[in-house]
Image: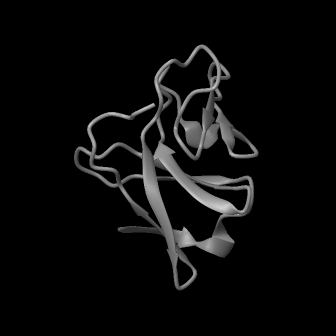
Amino acid sequence: MFPVCRIEDLPEGESVRIELGGAMPAIAVFHAEGGFYAVDDTCSHQDASLSEGWVEGCFVECPLHAALFDLRTGAPTCLPARRPVRTHEVSVLDGMIHVRPAVREEAVA
């Protein structure tokens, strides 16, 4: 588990990007619909940071071509994205958000 930030430092509708180093991809952590969600930060359609996208409900819109991803599953809900982004486990311990990166190789729709 990797610490991200305190819950009060990530307001509803906002996101934060974390870099874990090594071969791990950057992860975007979102506060949406009263919960916390984490996905790979790079859009599966083209190289764009999802943490810079727009959050609506439990979805994030890619800032580059408006692909929409479900933060709960990583699944794209519209074109141009066709492949899901990988999701990661999020937990809150003592007021601190933590992420456990997924170990699987690819996102599963």
Left or right, 6 with reference to 100: right
The answer to whether residue 46 shows anywhere in this view is no
Please determine whether, in this image, residue 107 is positioned above or below residue 36: above
User: Is 96 positioned to the left or the right of 40 in the image?
Assistant: right
Q: Could you say which quadrant of the image residue 11 lies in?
A: bottom right
Decide if residue 24 is on the left or right side of residue 30: left
Q: Position of residue 25 (x, y in %)?
A: 35, 42
- Is 20 placed left or right of 22 in the picture? right
Q: What residue lies at 49% left-to-right and 69% top-to-bottom?
A: 91
- The residue positioned 46% from the left and 23% from the top of the image is 83
User: What residue appears at the point 53 percent right and 85 percent down from the top-left corner?
Assistant: 94
Residue 32, given in percent of the width and then of the height, sits at: 70, 54
Front-lying residue, 55 or 70: 70
Measured as percent of width and height from the top left, residue 33 is found at 74, 56
Q: Residue at x 56, y 54 (%)?
A: 37
In the depicted view, which residue is nearer to us: 9 or 38? 38
The outermost residue toward the bottom is: 94
Q: Is residue 95 visible?
A: yes
- Against 73, is 61 above or below? above
Q: Quadrant of the C terminus?
A: top left
Return the x and y of residue 1 as percentages of the image width and height. Answer: 35, 68
Outermost residue toward the top? 80
